Image: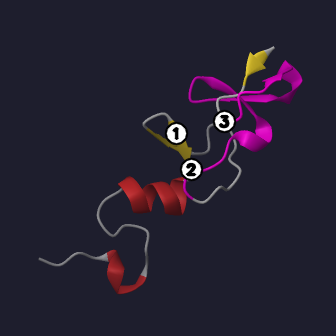
C-alpha cells in the first residue's frame, strides 16, 4: 500500500502510476493549472507539481509570451 500525493488515500499497486518520483492514482495525476489528466513522462514539473507541457507549463514558466499564439507570441522592446 502507498499514499497518493494528490488525495492521500492508501491504495494497491495495480492502481498507480509513477511520476515525479512519486506514486499516484492514475486519475489523480493532473495538471495543476487546467486539471487535465496526465500520463507518466508526458508532462512537465515545477516545484514538484505536474503541468501539461503545452499550453500550461509553456505559458506559466516558458519564455515570455510563448505558446499563446497571435500577436501575443512575440515580445517587442
Could you tell which of marks 3 and 1 lies nearer the N-terminus?
Answer: 3
Separation of disc 2 and disc 3 at Cα? 10 Å
- Please name the colour scheme applied to the rendered image: secondary structure
Q: Which residues are magenta?
A: 7-33
The residue positioned 43% from the left and 74% from the top of the image is: 68
Q: Residue 24, position in %: x, y?
A: 71, 31
Look at the numbered discs 2 and 3 and tell me whether their residues touch, using CB distance below 8 Å. no
Q: Is residue 29 magenta?
A: yes
Q: Earlier in the sequence, mark 2 or mark 3?
A: 3
Write down the residue under mark 3. 6
Placement of the C terminus among the 4 image quadrants: bottom left
Element type where label 1 sits in the image: strand
Mark 3 or mark 1, whichever is nearer to me: 3
- Whichever of labels 1 and 2 marks the residue nearer the N terminus, that label is 2
Describe residue 65's horizontal placement relative to residue 52 as left or right.
left
Determine whether label 1 and label 2 are within 8 Å by CB.
yes
Query: Eyeballing the image, is 73 above or below 22?
Result: below
Residue 50 placement (x, y as % from top left): 55, 42
Query: Can you tell which quarter of the image residue 18 is in?
Result: top right
Q: CA distance from mark 3 to mark 1?
A: 10 Å
Toward the top, the furthest residue is 1
Residue under numbered circle 1: 49
Quadrant of the snapshot with the N terminus = top right
Residue 18 included in the magenta stretch of the image: yes
- What residue is shown with label 2? 32
Q: Is residue 40 left or right of residue 76?
A: right
Is 74 drawn above or below residue 57 in the view shown? below
Q: Residue at x 73, y 41 (%)?
A: 28
Q: SS for tag 2?
A: loop
Q: Residues within 10 Å of mark 2 (few under 14, many from 20)?
A: some
Amino acid at each position: 500500500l502507498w499514499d497518493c500525493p494528490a488525495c492521500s488515500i492508501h491504495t494497491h499497486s495495480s492502481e498507480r502510476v509513477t511520476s515525479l518520483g512519486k506514486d499516484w492514482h492514475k486519475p489523480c495525476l493532473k495538471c495543476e493549472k487546467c486539471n487535465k489528466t496526465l500520463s507518466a513522462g508526458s508532462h512537465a514539473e515545477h516545484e514538484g507539481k505536474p503541468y501539461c507541457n503545452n499550453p500550461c507549463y509553456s505559458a506559466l514558466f516558458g519564455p515570455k509570451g510563448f505558446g499563446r499564439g497571435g500577436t501575443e507570441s512575440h515580445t517587442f522592446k
